[in-house]
Amino acid sequence: MKGCYKPEMREQIRTVMRWSGPRMLFVHPVLAVRHMKETMKAKKS
């Protein structure tokens, strides 16, 4: 995750995403799968 966040804030965001990410599969499955595909594609390049 790159951007203009300070390291402490970046870790806090990562913690929230670890908690909320799996729940997105139940709330918005299409958006969750699309996000995972885009993330995996971005990590390859």
Image (tube, rainbow, N blue to C red):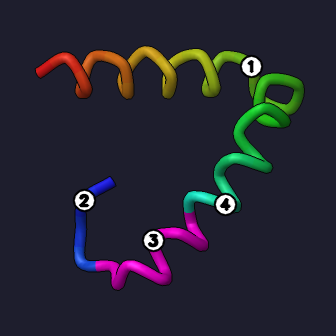
Chief secondary structure of the magenta portion: helix
Q: Is residue 4 above or below residue 25?
A: below
State the residue at coordinates (24%, 68%). 3
Q: Nearer the viewer, residue 19 or 27?
A: 19
Q: CA distance from mark 4 to mark 3?
A: 9 Å
Q: Amino acid at mark 3?
A: Arg
Judging by the rendered image, the residue that carries numbered circle 1 is 29
State the residue at coordinates (61%, 26%). 31
Classify mark 4: residues with Cα within 10 Å, few (<14), some (14-19) or many (20+). Answer: few
**Residue 41 position within the rendered picture, expressed as x and y whole percent measured from the top left:** 27, 17
Q: CA distance from mark 1 to mark 2?
A: 25 Å
Classify mark 3: residues with Cα within 10 Å, few (<14), some (14-19) or many (20+). Answer: some
**Residue 9 position within the rendered picture, expressed as x and y whole percent measured from the top left:** 49, 81
> Where is residue 29, by image quadrant?
top right
Q: CA distance from mark 2 to mark 4?
A: 16 Å
Q: In the rendered structure, does residue 39 fall within the stretch colored magenta?
A: no
Give the left or right position of residue 18, taking residue 41 as reference: right
Classify mark 1: residues with Cα within 10 Å, few (<14), some (14-19) or many (20+). Answer: few
State the residue at coordinates (60%, 73%). 12
Point out the frontmost of discs 1 and 2: 2
First to last magenta residue range: 5-13
Point out the frontmost of discs 1 and 4: 4
Q: Earlier in the sequence, mark 3 or mark 2?
A: 2
State the residue at coordinates (79%, 49%). 19
Q: Secondary structure at mark 2?
A: loop
Image disc number at residue 10: 3
Judging by the rendered image, the residue that carries numbered circle 4 is 15
Q: Amino acid at mark 2?
A: Lys
Image disc number at residue 2: 2
